[in-house]
Amino acid sequence: FAPWDDPNAKPLIQFQNVTKRFGDFTAIDDLTVDIFEREFFALLGPSGCGKTTMMRMLAGFETPTEGTILLSGQNIAPVPPNQRAVNMMFQSYALFPHLSVWDNIAFGLKRDRMPKDEMAARVEEMLRLTRLEKFARRKPHQISGGQRQRVALARSLAKAPKLLLLDEPLGALDKKLRQETQFELMDIQESTGTTFVIVTHDQEEAMTVASRVAVMDHGKIVQVATPDAIYEAPNSTYVADFIGDVNLLNGTVAAEGDKLHLSWAEGQPDIVGSSSKTFSKDQSAFFAIRPEKINITAQKPDGAANALKGKVLDIAYLGNISTYHVELKGGQVIKAQTANNRRISRRSFTWEDTVWLSWTDTAGVFLER
Ligand code: ATP
């Protein structure tokens, strides 16, 4: 499933040079992106970067100041919110407290004057989809938070929208329930074939559920790619830093060619690696490497493309993994992570241990900024 790689695939949603201003503040800045049918598309970015504004324009609560949004090839600007094949599920769920689960799900269908039989069948189908059959007669206060979340989802899907917008849909749930619910959400998205656009603060959540993740910064999408591409090949230090943990080493390009050499700290060997991007000599550049891509050993490893000597400063033991902060001679601190998958000892190294950090020449990425 990769319609974004198919030049013939028709996008469900197209943002074409969309700008949204509030007074003289630009919330969305000349943004262009395509979202495809059946995608689970995640908008990720710091508070205030414009995620909700994008959703509100799709739902019809805001109109672009400039540019066009197309839904199935049609400009949606003239279409009022209630006539768009778009629904929005809010973090607060906005369930009617005095109505049963069944009536909450039926609410929009009733309003549309759907025939009774058809409506009942549809509500039953939604109850099955969200595994709420047993709770149909209960009121929202008589069910759990996770169940309320599913009622809200069932209600938003009842009218079979083409597009469902989810604003922090799992924000009210505790971590464990949240993780379980992510898989449910993916199952439901897949079985209904509805296109989902989700806003979340939680990068792990975005990585888990999304077909593609759009990372936003100040009203722009700075990178849009599959979760693994975003993680393995971020296009800037901003994205690398926003998604997951990363070491960012700044330096100047010392030698180009087959292997890039980055001179980055006095007294330390150059960082050597391959790069798909071209850099010129003496150019400033960053090397980004994830902690888990760094090996940590007591002895200098033979034949490693990169090996740095340091001293263990801090250790964070997290059960499945341990993170080591290793200080190099010049004072630079590098984070390395090990998987605790061998049951020999809890910790292989301790504070003040002298260790070697090493990685291969394809373990990290070189970035311009
Ligand atoms: P959060 O993660 O905190 O919800 P967000 O990325 O969803 O943030 P938006 O709600 O889209 O951000 O807001 C983007 C920017 O636009 C913010 O700086 C916000 O203050 C501003 N903004 C949004 N709505 C309005 C409005 N109606 N009038 C003025 N400014 C607004």
Image (cartoon, rainbow, N blue to C red):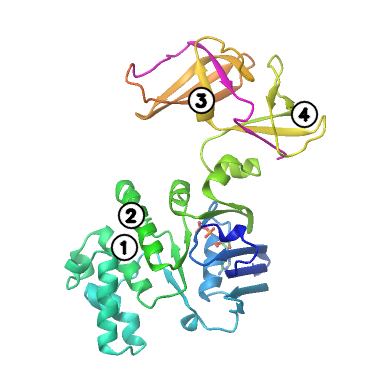
Sort mark 4 into few (<14), some (14-19) or many (20+) by Cα contacts within 10 Å. Answer: many
Give the residue displayed 54% in from the left and 60% down from the top: 51
Give the residue displayed 50% in from the left and 55% down from the top: 211
Residue type pointed to by label 2:
Thr
246 in relation to 192, above or below:
above
> Which is more N-terminal, label 2 or label 4?
2
Residue type pointed to by label 4:
Val
Residue 149: which disc? Answer: 1
How many angstroms separate mark 4 from mark 1 (CA)? 51 Å
Sort mark 3 into few (<14), some (14-19) or many (20+) by Cα contacts within 10 Å. Answer: many
Image quarter for ligand 1: bottom right
Where does residue 242 sit, x and y in percent of width and height?
Answer: 55, 44
- Residue at which label 3 appears: 336
For the magenta stretch, what is the residue range?
345-369
Q: Are marks 4 and 2 in contact (CB under 8 Å)?
A: no
- Residue at which label 2 appears: 181
- Select label 1 or label 2 by which is in front: 2
Quadrant assignment for the C terminus: top right
Residue 211: which disc? Answer: none
What kind of element bears circle 2?
Answer: helix
75 in relation to 308, above or below:
below
Q: Are marks 3 and 1 in contact (CB under 8 Å)?
A: no
Residue type pointed to by label 3:
Ala
